[in-house]
Amino acid sequence: MDRLKASDFDQEVLDLFDKYVHGIIERREFLDKAAKFAVGGVTAAGLLASLSPNYALAKEVDENDARIKAADIKYNSPKGHGTINGYLVRPSGGGKRGGVVVVHENRGLNPYIRDVARRVGAAGFTALAPDGLTPMGGYPGTDAEGKVMQKKLDKGKLLQDFIAAFQHLKADSNSNGKVGVVGFCFGGGIVNKMAVRLPDLAAGVPFYGRQPKTDAEVAKIKAPLLINNGALDKRINKGAAAYEAALKKHGKEFTAYMYANANHGFHNDTTPRYDEGMAKLAWKRTIDFFHAKLT
């Protein structure tokens, strides 16, 4: 099947979809407001279906790829929800490796994030992608259900579950002692929170994530950051300039990129918001950054 692109949709529809997937509006409101764009036999429900993830489109690195060894594991999160499920991907071959925590969006450890973990492993790092929905039985198989489940979790404990993943990788017998984190959407916000709380975080890459709320939080950041945002992402970009100004004020090491004509979620290759050119560029920069900071 042909992949739909963001350019196949009116930008107002894409903005409505962004509000829907982040719980700002409910499904009914999306359908009502998107109805005026449903023409030529396409319904508002059809628009929603077209914008929703299609995981058949996104497997860049196969589970059996010779470059990696992947397995589902459990790790301890004593300050969070206890025992957490995670997807651990190691590069083939020996030697000490840098580690990368891969933080999902606001819907659990879906196939896209599992594939991202495999991409990190194929690049030569040990990747751990936690399933934040573990306390509720794990990722349910659909993003729509996962989004509803994640909203019910204790946010403080959920953050601790990702911090525990960082500690798990740091203590790994094959670790070189350097651990970074990459996250998308909700996960991008978690990257920023971890940067505030973890002085020994070696590198952080937030993709279109919420910024720290206060200047005092930014002052605590020690990790170098690579910030990736889409130019059409109105919601996240409201705080982008202030965050960069605060990072500069406190002399923090960071690079921020704004990707032209890219929407929120432009790296996620399972939806039409995916921008192939910008996603590949952002990912190359991400892997190059990790090679510079974690090896």
Image (spheres, helix red, strand yellow):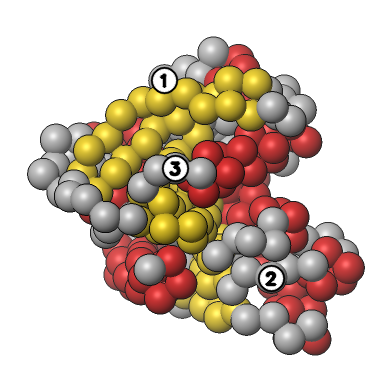
The residue under the point 58% across, 20% down is 83
Q: Which mark is residue 172?
A: 3
Given residues 167 and 257, the one toward you in this image is 167
- Viewer-side label of 3, 2: 3
Asked whether the beta carbons under mark 3 and mark 2 sit within 8 Å of each other, the answer is no
Say whether disc 1 or disc 2 marks the residue closer to the N-terminus: 1
Q: Which mark is residue 222?
A: 2
Which SS class for mark 3? loop
Given residues 211 and 33, the one toward you in this image is 211
The residue under the point 30% across, 29% down is 71
Q: Quadrant of the C terminus?
A: bottom left
The image shows residue 203, relative to residue 17, as above or below, that is below
The image shows residue 278, relative to residue 96, as above or below, that is below
Q: Position of residue 253 (x, y in %)?
A: 62, 81
Q: Position of residue 256 (x, y in %)?
A: 57, 78
CA neighbours of label 3 inside 10 A, class few (<14), some (14 to 19), many (20+): some
What's the CA distance linking mark 3 and mark 2?
Answer: 22 Å
In this rendering, position of residue 86 left or right of residue 198: left
Asked whether the beta carbons under mark 3 and mark 1 sit within 8 Å of each other, the answer is no
Q: Position of residue 161 (x, y in %)?
A: 63, 34
The image shows residue 149, relative to residue 6, as above or below, that is above
- Toward which corner of the image does residue 271 lie, by quadrant? top left
Asked whether the beta carbons under mark 1 and mark 2 sit within 8 Å of each other, the answer is no
The residue under the point 74% across, 60% down is 196
- Viewer-side label of 3, 1: 3
Which SS class for mark 1? loop
Say whether disc 3 or disc 2 marks the residue closer to the N-terminus: 3
The residue under the point 69% across, 27% down is 78
The residue to which callout 1 is attached is 141
Q: Amino acid at mark 3?
A: Asp
Q: Amino acid at mark 1?
A: Gly
